[in-house]
Amino acid sequence: MKKTLYIFRNGNLKRKNQTLLLETENGSKYIPVEDTNEILIFGEVDFNKRLLEFLSQKEILLHLFNHYGYYVGSFYPREHLNSGYMILKQAICYQDDEKRLQLAKALIHGAVYNILQVLKYYRNRGKNVAPYMESIASLQGLVEASATIEELMALEGNMRGYYYQSFDPILENKEFVFENRSKQPPKNKLNALVSFGNTLLYTTVLSEIYKTHLDPRIGFLHATNFRRFTLNLDVAEVFKPVFVDRLIFSLVAKKMIAAKDFDQRAGGTFLTERGKKIFITEWDKRLKTTIKHRNLGRNVSNRRFIRLELYKIQKHLMGEKTYIPYKAQW
């Protein structure tokens, strides 16, 4: 399995013959391109056009983050698998209100199912989350009645609002309280964890889209506009509860992340470099964790489940098979 390279230190990243060379204050390190899937840069790293040409040739994506851990942008190499046929299929679906709404509802069904699965898991472990499950379930039945994307998004926002309220009884930790969702900037530690985790998921999904025939610029739940990528935001909704939120609960419960791993800066709360490294180490482990796929009859990594989700959307758009979202089973 190809690896993700995370760079935190300042330095230079360059092409050296047929491999990559990372030069930092700690010395030089060669990185085999054959083993590299994507590169995420959090430090101040210099690179040039020669490197970008090499990454494009090797089909390696480059994701950039600023000092606060915010996503800045991506070097998305020339699409080797992109097809005009699939772009047309995506555009036709997006422009057909009924078809777009159908696919958007399926994505929301997947997201809400996985939210309730997470809450069920913690309810069975004695956490007082039943009231939130009931509130979400009462709204879940309204998904199919939504007549527009705007109605659907508002409904999803209300369900996720109840879900976020359950974080405090799940964690039972005075250092980590949710209060309410705040993003730019996150106002407290728990929001900082959610924002950072969601950002990692968005970039992971984007990298997986690159390995398919799909175009990341045409989403269905999130409006396709002047924002560069939207399809990754759509697909991430299905996986957030299982991949991001459960990881956060685990990090806090096991005291792997503590108050000292956050800074107050620029009017918000952000993970320190140490905090980001801890989160990413565990995130990488989660993506590599394998689970038996019921239909394939073999073990599949969590990262692979994302790719399989994209393949299902491709088949849906081609009219081969109606899209059924990923549903976590424990």
Image (spheres, rainbow, N blue to C red):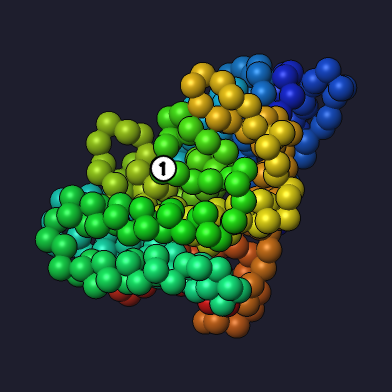
**Residue 194: where, in percent of width, then height?**
52, 45
**Residue 313: where, in percent of width, then height?**
36, 63
Quadrant the N terminus occupies: bottom right
Q: Which residue is mark 1?
A: 181
**Left or right: where does residue 52 sit relative to residue 17?**
left
**Residue 308: where, in percent of width, then height?**
49, 65
Q: Is residue 75 visible?
A: no
Residue type at mark 1?
A: Arg
Q: Quadrant of residue 175?
A: top right
Quadrant the C terminus occupies: bottom right
**Residue 185: where, in percent of width, then height?**
46, 29
Residue found 29% across the figure and 47% down from its top: 222
Q: Indicate whether 89 appears above or below 320.
A: above
Q: Nearer the viewer, residue 270 or 218?
A: 270
**Left or right: where does residue 20 sit relative to residue 300?**
right
Q: Nearer the viewer, residue 281 or 139?
A: 139
Circle 1 crowding by C-alpha within 10 Å: few under 14, some 14–19, many from 20: some
Residue found 23% across the figure and 52% down from its top: 154
* Furthest residue toward front: 174
Q: Indicate whether 215 appears above or below 243.
A: above
Residue found 73% across the figure and 50% down from its top: 255
**Left or right: where does residue 169 sit relative to residue 102?**
right
Residue found 80% across the figure and 20% down from its top: 24
